[in-house]
Each structure stands twice: as C-alpha cells, then as structure tokens.
Image (cartoon, grey):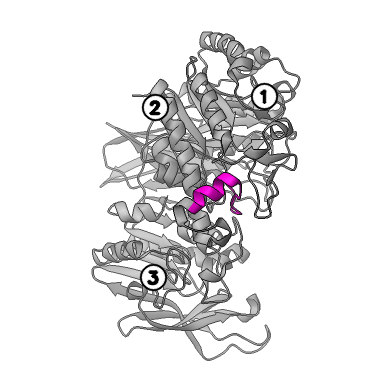
Amino acid sequence: MKWWYNEPLLISAVQCKFEDDDSWTLNEYVAKAGFNTEQLLHLTAKGHMAYYNEEAHGKKLDEYLQQSRKLNIREIIYYNTHCLTPDIIKEHPDWQQLKRDGTPIPAYNIYALNCVNGGWFDDFAKNIEQLCKHDIDGIFLDGPVMREVGCYCDTCQKIFKERFGKSIYDATHMELQTMRVDSVTEYIKKTNKIVKSINPNILLYLNNSALRPDITGSNSRKVEPYVDMLGAEGGFIRADHKTSLWAVSSKAKHLETVAKGKPRVTFVLGNQSALAYYMHNPVETTILYAQSFANGANVWYGMSGSASQFKDSEGSKASIGFNRFVAEHKDLFQQSNSVANVALLWSQETANNYSSSVEQSDFTAEKAASFKERGDHYTELMSFYDMLAREHIQFDIIDEISVLENLEKYRLIILPNCACLSDQTAEALKRYVKAGGNLCSTFDTGFYDEQGRFSTEPKLSELQGVESVEGLVKYPSNGTAYQRRSDCDWLFKDIKPEVLPNPLLSVKCIPTEQSQVVSVSLDPMTSVYTALPDKGFPGIILNQCGKGNSVYFTGNIGICYADRSHPDFSKMIRNIVSYYASPMVETDCLGSVEMVLRKQEDRYLLHLINLTGEMTRPMNRIVPLQNIHICVQVPDGLSVSAIRGGKVLEPLIKENELSFTLSQLNDYEVVVMTTK
C-alpha cells in the first residue's frame, strides 16, 4: 500500500517566501505544529509564486530533505502550473494563454495564465523529471488551468484545427469546452507518466474542481485516473454572511464520490480568503478542520503570510490543537465509508451548459431555447444540502457517472434542478425507479440534453407523472406566489398551514391520469394585498412508476428556500426521506449541529460538529449544548463512548437501533460505536 494510505494526512502549506528562513519554517513551525507532511512552496518561492529549477533548487532541496527526514516530515513539492511571473513572460511571451483578440489572459492582476499546450509544458516536463530523482514524497500541481474563454495562441489554433477540422475562431461553445477539458486532462496524464516512470511512490495530486463548472478546464472525473489523491478548496472561505455553513463538508462529500476510494483532502486556508494577512479565529478554524475529517478527507492547512507572522495567532493555535488531537486518535481518521442511503445529485453537465451561481455565463445561439428564465443548479443543490443537513439526514453527493455505475445503496435520490441530462443518465434513473428506487426532482430537471439543448419532451416525464408541459410561470414577487396543499398526511406531516409560499419560477404542466397532485400552485397575484386566486396548476406531483416512486416539485423550491429558509419546505424534505428512505440518525438536537455517520471495519463513528454560533460569520463563539438525545440505526451488540469530553448516558440497544444521550457537545465530538 502506498504511503498516503497509511495514516491521516496533516499537511502544512506556508504559501509564501518573504522574510522567514526555510529551516526556521520547518523546525519552528511545521515540526512543532503537529504536521506530518509539508507541501513545500517556500523553499523555491519568490513571494507567493514557486516553480522548480534543478540548477537553482536541487542542492538546497536535498539539504532540506535531510532535515525533514530527521523530523519525520514528508515533503510534497509545490509547483505552480497555472500562471507566469513578469520575468518569465519577458523571456517566453509565447507561453501565455491568449484571448480571442490576441491579448494575454491576466492572473491576479499582475501575472498571466500560461498555456497548457505550448512550449511551457516542455520546460515543465524537463524540470519535473529532474525533481523526481530527488528523495521527495510527492508533487502538488497548482493548476493547470485553461479558462472558459479558451486559448487562441498559435499552438492551440493548430491543435483545434487538427481535431475539429476548422478554425478555432469558428468554434462552438461545446467544442471550446471539449478542447479545454481535454487539454488539461492530457497535461495531467503526461505528467503522471513522467512521475510514475521514475518513482511510483511519489504522490501526485492537484487542486481539483468540486461542485463547480469546468471553468478552469480541470474536470475531476477526467483527471482522477492520473492522480493519487483528490483535493479541493473547500476551506478557502471568507466567513461572511454569504458563506455556507457546509462549505467544507459539501466539497468533501463530492470528492469522495469522484475519488473511487483514493484519499481526499480539503484545503483549509488559515487566513480568510482574499484577506491574505488576516487569520481566521479559532472557532472558524476548528469548524473547517472538523468538517473535513468528519466527511472522510484529510486536511491541508495553509497560510498566505510568513509562518513567523501567524504561528502564534489564535487561529493557528487552534489548528495545532486539532493536529495533536488527530495524531492521538489516528485510528479514528483512517479509511472509513459513508453509510448514507440518500443521494443528492450534482449535475456537471447542468453546471457547464445550463446556469449556476458558481459561474454565470451567457448562452450561445446553439444552446437555444426554451424557457427564457432559468433556474440555478448550484444554489438549488446547496439549499437541499442545507435542508438535509439540518434534519441530520445522512446523504452522499453523487454525479452522472455515479448514476451510470451503481445506485443500489440508495433508497432515495434527489435531483435539484438537474436540467441537463443525457439519454443514458435518464434511462439509468428510470431503471432505478422502476426497480424500486425513489426520486425527488425539481423545476426543469431533465428538460435539456447534456449539451444544454431544449428537449422536445422532458426526459423524466414518465417518472415525474407529467403528460405535457404548457410553459413557465414567473411570479412578480414573493408576496404574489402561493400554493395550496392537500391532505397528504405523510408529506405534510407537522405542517399546519394550508397555504404555503410558492417558488417564483414554476413549470406549468398537465399531470398524467395515474399521478396525484398534492399541492396546487396558485396563479400569480397582481398585488401582495389582493385575494388569493381560485385557480392554479400542479405544484407537487406524486407518481408511482414500476416498483418505485417520484415526488416532483414543479417549482425551484431550493431557490425559494435560499431566499427565505421556509421551515415547512425543510419539513417536507424530511418527510420525503422518512417515508421513502428511513433516517439513519434521529435526534432532538438543533439543526446547527452537523452529524455524519461513517463506518470502519468493526465500528461506526458519529461525528458531531457544533455550528451553533451567535448568528453571525465569522463565528466568534460556539454555544455548548447539553443532553442531546440521539438514535442511530446500527447493528445491535455495540459498545459506545465519546472521546472529546462528552459522556454517553443511558445507552439502549435493541433491534439494530442504538439510542443514547450525549451529556455535552462543545465544538466537536466523535461518538465511537464498536462491535462487541
């Protein structure tokens, strides 16, 4: 087994080289802060940029490696592969990515993006080959990147012409996207071949994309075969009122799906993102660490300033404390698996070819159309994430590849405005439902093909119980949009109002005779102070198809929830999960406590992350909680204990169910349930 599987990785990443001595950084910060691995940038850096050159860096790298070996610190060498400094540009102007008008594509206002297809790679390949002959443990590639505008340099023009038989200036949106993704993938593939031919024990990884469109050309699914670990910037956050509570957790869940059993890591930036010299407080630092490890990923902890500036900051001290906790309990953070029976679908094709708040883009003529108004897949997905997490539902984030591979473990799959689906994905979902699976979908899920072209018939209409679609209804404002629910006991359990808010965008459709309309979206009101309309159209449709079932929300309720966080929406989602999937964790705890249940060979681990702050970000203080009642669906015959200060009271084991009371939850707790 490769070394990167042996223990949880605690990776230090000092992201600059200014006044600090390299040996001081290693001896006084990295080693003393409890890290077992370093992503080494400062040795070869000028400011925040670092490349490798054998003549300039080879000798001092060997000397540094000798020091780190004595301290039992593994070394992963950082290599900037996405931008060029002014001195490099001056010497090699032909290495730059060029816009359509022939001007360079800037990076960070002071650099330029390098082209992954040009002469840059030849120089990079030579340096990587020489680097791999040293006693290093790994290589981290910061990039490569090929932005969504495409590159129009001479090399890219030639490659495009050879592949597509026409000028790149006549390229379609899909052709440019294919060119970008394939170019970045080929870069990683060739790098992998060089590295592994010299030393297969060198870990190779890069900054993968997660839960975003392929705006950089780096598609995690495409590059996965050529890397040993997958990582993403889940912990690069601003900690403001717009920051999701689940920023790290969501990325870690997605990476687990893509990684196919390989290790994952989330990058936790010690300073606030975009504030390079202002560190996170200890509360935020602890949350970011805990969410990564709780969701099965390792932690990379970086700082954009010199270590001597921030090693004694309160945030840095919190990272050191968590490092030591993980080192003391390595076994708890070894390989574990999700036990979720609910899945939330991230649609890469929708993110690329429909619309997403991660990266808004104009639609080219070829992606024509349909509804003038579009939903927002990413916001819809994160709203469902919030509802599920606050109800303590155990769930995974899957993608279209997962749908084609295996869905047997899931009793319910949620499609949040997954507008763009291929025929293959749609057929796989149909087989899943007809065989007994359950589906929940929203708005125009399946109304487009994988390239963003409007479909003549919604691809999942058979499952959704839709006979035909008449068009789109857009409401003027929140106060003009309502729906009237029926008496469906299980779906509207604990929901008292008969009239609920309605999303501002809804599909107006005709249901099939076999389906059941359980909520009617009322026609738009002309004013917030007029009488409720008498007429409307289907708002929620229940349908049975084969042995399985579908719940179809004709509106984009995730967007509506993102705007107002209507608690009755969250209750509906909880009721759907309870009815079709049976929750694996039930508790009276606040929704601001994240609970993640995972399984190792002979035990279950329940991670509890307390996000109960003072209703602001950054969170400056966590409110401790007492006497939390928890019921977990696990096999009987377990012993149970907590390891971070809480006490397990009144444990009761019966018929594959363990119930207990946790005496206190401070910031983070792990409850260990071991087979007797």
Give the residue at x 64% y 39%.
94
611 or 228, nearer to the observer: 228
Asked whether the viewer can see residue 664, the reply is no
Which numbered disc, 3 or 2, marks the residue that appears first in the sequence?
A: 2
22 or 579, nearer to the observer: 22
Which numbered disc, 1 or 2, marks the residue that appears first in the sequence?
A: 2
Q: Between tags 3 and 2, which lies in front? A: 2
For label 2, the residue is 5
Instruction: Answer left or right for 495 relative to 640.
Output: right
Q: Disc 2 on helix, strand or loop?
A: helix
Q: Position of residue 209 (x, y in %)?
A: 52, 45
Q: Disc 1 on helix, strand or loop?
A: strand
Q: Where is residue 543 in the image (x, y as percent from the top left)?
A: 33, 75
For label 1, the residue is 45
Is residue 658 within the magenta segment?
no
Give the residue at x 27% y 41%.
636
Task: Report the span colored magenta.
Answer: 146-161
